[in-house]
Image (cartoon, rainbow, N blue to C red):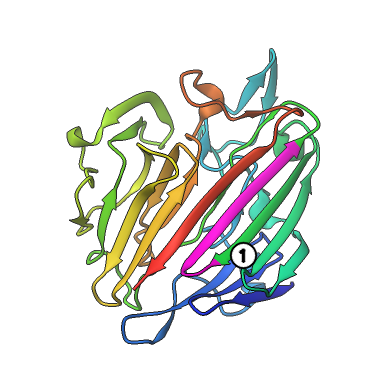
Amino acid sequence: MIQNTIKNDKIELTVLDFGAIIQKIIVKDKNGTPTNMVVGFDEPEDYLNNPMFLGACIGRYAGRISQGGFSLDGKTYPIHEKDGVHLHGGIAGFNTKTFEVTHVNHGTKPFIQLSYVSEHLEEGYPGNLNVTVTYTLDDDALIITHEASTDQKTVVNLTNHSYFKLDTTEEVNHYTLQLDCSKVLATHNNLIPTGELIEVSKTNYDFLERTPLANTRLDTPFVIDKRHEICASAYSEISGITLEVTTNQPAVVIYTPETTGSICFETQNYPDAPNHPNFPSSVLTPEDTYYNQSTFRFKV
C-alpha cells in the first residue's frame, strides 16, 4: 500500500492508494493540540478488512439501490443485493480497489490525485468508467473532487465515507449540528427511499437551527436547500472545532454509528435514484463528465 501525506499551515492529510482512503486529517484544536479528525487504523494493512468503509471512496453508486438492479434504455442490469438492498457499489466496490497515485503536489495549494478504471460490468454496472479523485488543501479546508467519464451510458454516484471526530471523546452527543436542509427522503425500514420527500419539521431530524445531537441517531438522506453554500455545520465545544460542509450535490447522507463516536457527511445524489424517475438523474453518458466537489472546512 502506498501512503501519501500533504500538509499546509492548518491541515495535514494522509491518503492511501487502497480505496483512495483518507487515513488522517490532522488539525489543531483550540488548545493547539494536533488532533486526528477521522476514525481510522494506524496500520494501512488493517484497511484490507474495512466493513465500515472508513475513509474510503464509495462507488460506483454510493448509498442504496433497490430491486436488485436498474434499467437503462430498456435493458436491465442486475447488481448484487442482500435482503433487497445493494449497498455502496456492491461486494467489491471502490473501497476495495487500488487506485493509481497520479499526482502529489506539495506546493502552496497541496493536492493528491488518484485514478481508477472500473471496467464494463464490474459489480454489474455498464461501461468502462474512468474515475479521478483529488484531495486538495486550501487554508483550513479539505476539498474532495470526484470526476468520472464513461464510454457507455451508466449510473454514477460517488462520495467519501470518512467518519469525522471533532474531539478525542468517544461520543457525539455533545456535538451541535445545524443543517441547511428543510427536507429528508422518506425511507422504508431497510433505508431504501420511498420516493417521498418530507419536511424536517414533521420528523425528529429538524436541525435548521443549531441543535445538540443528544441521543438522535442518524442514517438519513437530507435534501440540501442551496448547493455551493454551507449545508451542514457540526461543532464540539470540547475542541472548539467547527466542521462546515459545502457541496455541489443535491443531498447529504448523515450517519452517526452507534459503535464509534463519529459523524459521516456523505455528499451525493439521492440514494436509489436509478429507480425513482422523480429523483435527480444519476445517469452519465459518454458526452458528459461526472463532477462532484465537496469542501470540508475545519474552523477553530
Name the residue: 28% across, 75% down. 240
Using the image, determine if residue 264 lies above or below residue 195.
below
Q: Mark 1 points at which residue?
A: 49
Q: Quadrant of residue 152?
A: top right
Which residue occupies the extreme top position in the image?
Answer: 74
146 drawn magenta: yes
Using the image, determine if residue 293 lies above or below residue 20.
above
Name the residue: 37% across, 87% down. 32
Tell me: 236 left or right of 152: left
Q: Can residue 62 be seen by looking at this rendering?
A: yes
Name the residue: 76% across, 65% down. 103
Q: Where is residue 109 in the image (x, y as percent from the top left)?
A: 61, 68
Which residue occupies the extreme front position in the image?
Answer: 108
Q: Can residue 164 be seen by looking at this rendering?
A: no
Marker count (numbered): 1
Tell me: 164 left or right of 178: right
The quadrant of the image that shows the C terminus is bottom left
Q: How crowded is mark 1: few (under 14 residues within 10 Å), some or many (20 or more)?
A: few
Q: Where is residue 169 in the image (x, y as percent from the top left)?
A: 31, 76
Name the residue: 39% across, 87% down. 33
22 drawn magenta: no
Nearer to us in this view, 135 or 127: 135
Q: Quadrant of residue 204?
A: top left
The quadrant of the image that shows the N terminus is bottom right
The boundaries of the magenta stretch are 138-149
> Label 1 amino acid?
Asn
Q: Is mark 1 on a helix, strand or loop?
A: loop
Using the image, determine if residue 74 lies above or below residue 129.
above
Q: Position of residue 15 (x, y in %)?
A: 63, 69
Q: Where is residue 5 in the image (x, y as percent from the top left)?
A: 64, 76
The chief SS type of the magenta part is strand
